[in-house]
Amino acid sequence: MEKELSASAQRVQSALENSGLSLQVVELPASTRTAQEAADAIGCQVGQIIKSLVFKTTHTNRPVLILASGSNRVSESNLSEWIGEGLVKADADFVRQQTGYAIGGVPPLAHNQDLQTWIDEDLLGYETLWAAAGTPHAVFCLTPSELLSISGGKVIKIIG
């Protein structure tokens, strides 16, 4: 008998099912809060891990979701050019309010509201990717094309 998913992970699983994709959320005993922890727990390259980073625009206070390769550092100045205003890293309360998830578990879909989403072009170079699924212990495997489909994000160059 399979272990039942936690409420947050089940929310992501339901959203995946509603998207029409046959993707499966798994909860791991080891933490996947950071890209390195996730790669170690899964047994993949750090670059295959999708970091879900939430920023807040400096003038309009809008949430912006950046889906970055785990091996890349985000250039906030590059992102600001794409977005058209400055960005600051969002605090934990803002992230939970906007997405419905805690930092370390933010998935690329199933948020409290629609988020402007940008995808690191380097993620498209991998055959398979791993994304957070609602908790720091939950993940799911997907392809770059599935990521584009479920996130509705625009692909950009993240690093400067």
Image (tube, helix red, strand yellow):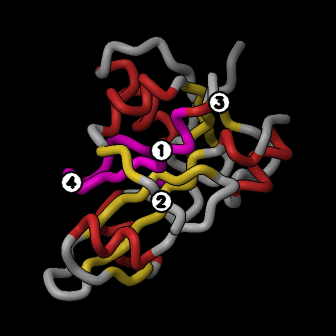
Q: Earlier in the sequence, mark 4 or mark 2?
A: 4
Q: Position of residue 62 (x, y in %)?
A: 20, 72
Q: Nearer the viewer, mark 1 or mark 3?
A: 1
Residue 77 in which image quadrant = bottom left
Q: Compare marks 3 and 4 and give the one earlier in the sequence.
A: 3
Q: Nearer the viewer, residue 116 or 18?
A: 116
Q: Tags 1 and 4 in contact by the CB under 8 Å rule?
A: no
From this view, report whether residue 140 is shown above or below residue 107: above
Residue 121 colored magenta?
yes
Pointer 1 or 3: first along the chain: 3
Residue at image position (35%, 52%) is 118
- Mark 3, residue position: 26
Q: Residues within 10 Å of mark 2 (few under 14, many from 20)?
A: many
The residue type indicated by label 2 comes to Ile
Whether residue 75 is visible: yes
Front residue (pair 44, 83): 83
Label 4 or label 2, whichever lies nearer to me, is: 2
Numbered circle sitting on residue 158: 2
The x and y percentages for residue 137 are 68, 47
Left or right: 63, with 109 as reference point = left
Kindly identify the residue that appears in the image at 57 percent across and 46 percent down. Answer: 50
Q: Secondary structure at mark 2?
A: loop
Element on which disc 3 rests:
strand
Q: Amino acid at mark 3?
A: Val
In magenta, the rendered stretch is 105-124
Q: CA distance from mark 3 to mark 2?
A: 28 Å
Mark identifier at residue 155: none
Q: Distance between the Cα atoms at labels 1 and 3?
A: 26 Å
Q: Residue 113 got which mark?
A: 4
The residue labelled by disc 1 is 121
Q: CA distance from mark 1 to mark 4?
A: 24 Å
Q: Residue at x 31, y 52 (%)?
A: 117
